[in-house]
Amino acid sequence: QAQLVESGGGLVQAGGSLRLSCTASGRTVSSYAMGWFRQAPGKEREFVAAISRIGGNTVYAESVKGRFAISRDNAKNTLYLQMVSLKPEDTAVYYCAVANGFLLATRRSDYDYWGQGTQVTVSS
């Protein structure tokens, strides 16, 4: 079992930046790919970004490409999401997750463990 705790969310104006963190405990996650998803009110949870177990490969949703950067520090069992040039449509609860393998994954069904989420609100 892995427990994931996200932090770093908050209220920011459009054009601003935030860095989300996700710390894992109960299990070493360095052998697995990890990812970020988000869910806006009334919408399905959607893929945002994923990173391979070593961190050498990443993939992003088109809507965040060039603005968000995913990274990880396996020594700290921590995943990050640096977000810049935020837009009101980025407003959502952001979730980190651990995949069931080491390959990049973009589907919710590819992930076994999820955090509780952290709210990101971008005002216009």
Image: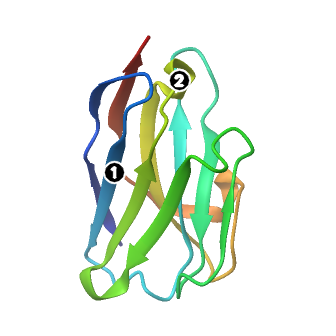
Vertical arrangement, residue 94 with respect to residue 32, above or below: above
3D distance between C-alphas at marks 2 and 1: 17 Å
| Residue 87 x/y as whole percent | 52, 25
The amino acid type of the residue labelled 1 equals Leu
Q: Residue at x 69, y 66 (%)?
A: 105
Figure quadrant of the N terminus = bottom left
For mark 1, what is the residue?
A: 20
Secondary structure at numbered mark 1: strand
Nearest to the observer: residue 81 or residue 109: 81
Hey, which quadrant is residue 46 in on the image? top right
Residue 36 image point, x, y percent: 51, 53
Residue at 33% x, 50% y is 19
- Residue 60, percent across and down? 67, 55
Relative to residue 116, is residue 106 drawn left or right? Answer: right
Judging from the image, what secondary structure is the residue with disc 2 in?
Answer: loop
Q: Amino acid at mark 2?
A: Ala
- How far across and how far down the image is residue 114, in percent? 43, 55
Q: Is residue 103 left or right of residue 38?
A: right
Residue in the image at 71% along x and 58% along y: 106
Pick whichever, 118 or 111, lies toward us: 118
Q: Which residue is mark 2?
A: 40
In the image, taking residue 111 as reference, residue 98 lies left or right, namely left
| Drawn side of residue 8 relative to residue 62, left or right | left
Applied colour scheme:
rainbow
Q: Which residue is nearer to you in this view: 104 or 115?
A: 104
